[in-house]
Image (cartoon, coloured by chain):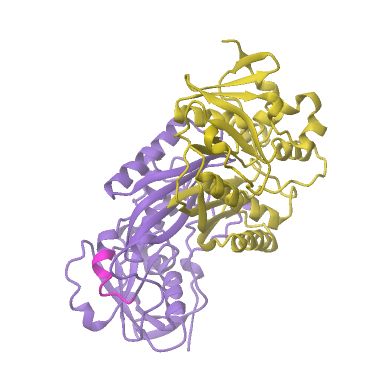
Chain colours: A purple, B yellow
Amino acid sequence: MVLTTDALVEGTHFRMGWEPPPALGRRALRINVSDVAAMGAVPRAALVAIEAPADLPVRVLDGIMRGLVADARRLAVAVVGGNVAAGPHLALTVTLIGETGPRLLRRRGARAGDLLFVTGTLGGAAAAVRALEAGRRVSRPPVPLRVETARRLARLATAAIDVSDGLLQDLGHLCRASGVTAEIEAARVPVAPRCRRELGAEATRFALTAGEDYELLLAIPPRAAGRIGTVGCRLTRIGALRAGPPAVRLIDGARSLRVAGWPGFDHFAGRPRDRGGPAACRPRGSRLRMVAG
Amino acid sequence: MVLTTDALVEGTHFRMGWEPPPALGRRALRINVSDVAAMGAVPRAALVAIEAPADLPVRVLDGIMRGLVADARRLAVAVVGGNVAAGPHLALTVTLIGETGPRLLRRRGARAGDLLFVTGTLGGAAAAVRALEAGRRVSRPPVPLRVETARRLARLATAAIDVSDGLLQDLGHLCRASGVTAEIEAARVPVAPRCRRELGAEATRFALTAGEDYELLLAIPPRAAGRIGTVGCRLTRIGALRAGPPAVRLIDGARSLRVAGWPGFDHFAGRPRDRGGPAACRPRGSRLRMVAG
């Protein structure tokens, strides 16, 4: 059994009107499904804790739950309970109980020599949020469902994590847990077309740090990589792991530079109480620092 | 296995300064322990989802977690995970996984003829909150731990619920789930001394509807009641169940009146966004309506 909990907080992870209520409900479930999938497990049961202002129309809550429950049914997840509390804003905290498959994937376990793979594309979700924050009316892409892909790859992978706070930050977690150095080839990173279109020359940096993707990052030994086969979605080899201290290196053309710190989504960078702005999804690409050595 | 989730929301369930951070952490855990105990189950693992403003001092969060973890250790509950998200205020959502005992207690299952028992005393916690809301510096009593009591009574009881939103409201849930009418003898209700002292003539009505007690309400058949023995806390017989439509009747001296509606804590009565006040714990005793028939 695996357990996970994750929240969507109004003003931090979403604003009212960015997506229809059912899409928000699906998102609240799927950010948790992503965590369960990243362990090679299958989600089975969910609890939904809702915090809502008293003046929120009931139809909005109904819409949220309709979307969440429909998605849960599709995934054979039973919504078995929850809670509703009054609060100054909307927040959705979902807890998922998952069943482990034949092999449990963790952040630790990756070894020097393993290849690094990522599902789908990166930067598209954060690019949409960036546009929404700028007041443009764009559709927010749904969180991808990678349960089946993860289940197929779990037998081959040595470690995995889902990319929610930016590839470099989440890869950093994997490197620290596994005690390895990662080398990413910038040219191989599967940047989402929307991100490329909107960010231009900054697209790759943005995609490496912006977060919100909920794609899977997996370490797979070279011998096992040949047996991957079809996994139901795009799967890109973006680099490899080397012996060395926990660190992430970015190979950009002829240069190989170490990523300084752990750039990516900083949950508390926005100081929402002081500045009134959401902390989430602000582009961090410009903050990315790389150093020699 | 049983699963439950419950939240403490700043401005709704507490205000900063009402109790030290460790006591707040204990409260967040115990309101969930209460739900697990009410099913005759034993809590085993917890997930803690925290929403916190960026300007909250880290020592406050540390204090909250210290109190929560110390209490969890005492109860042999493993804190296995959680989440931290930025938000405009502090909210603590705990999910508990419990192991069922030999018999699972539910709201349904009570039968006409069963006697009604309640643990501890009622109205003391809400009386303290009332004083705190009035600006007086009083100590907020901790949520009682009734795991062991519930475990002992589970083999005798036909149904149970924890009293979190007021005895009359929670008893109403039990009556509806079990399809019975409850009769409560007002004179038997174990009103907390603090409640009696502060509420005077209104103490019983306040204790019946104010909520926050987290005591256990149990239905036990008369034949089993003789075998109760010691349960580790005060246990008071307050009434009995009769055949009839789901309803609660209050016997006050020679009068027997039906409680109208389901009085008690209304999670959304405060409209916090509009009025700025907490929705919780406002005395509802005066709102209690009883009708003939």
Q: Nearer the viewer, residue B107 or B13?
A: B107
Relative to B21, is B37 above or below? above
Examine the rendering and report whether any part of residue A277 can be seen. Answer: no
Give me the residue at 45% from left, 50% from top: B3
> Residue B272 appears in which quarter of the rendering?
top right
Q: Nearer the viewer, residue A20 or A225?
A: A225
For the point 66% across and 57% down, the residue is B55
Q: Is residue B141 left or right of residue B160?
A: right
Q: Residue B231 location in percent, x, y?
A: 63, 47
Q: Read off the magenta span.
A: A150-158
Looking at the picture, how far across and down is residue B130, in whole percent? 75, 36
Q: Is residue B79 above or below residue B41?
A: below
Count up the numbered dots: 0
**Quarter-of-image position of residue B227:** top right
Q: Which image quadrant: the N terminus of chain A?
A: bottom left
Regarding residue A64, the answer to whether it shows in the image is yes
Residue B145 coordinates in the image, percent (x, y): 63, 50
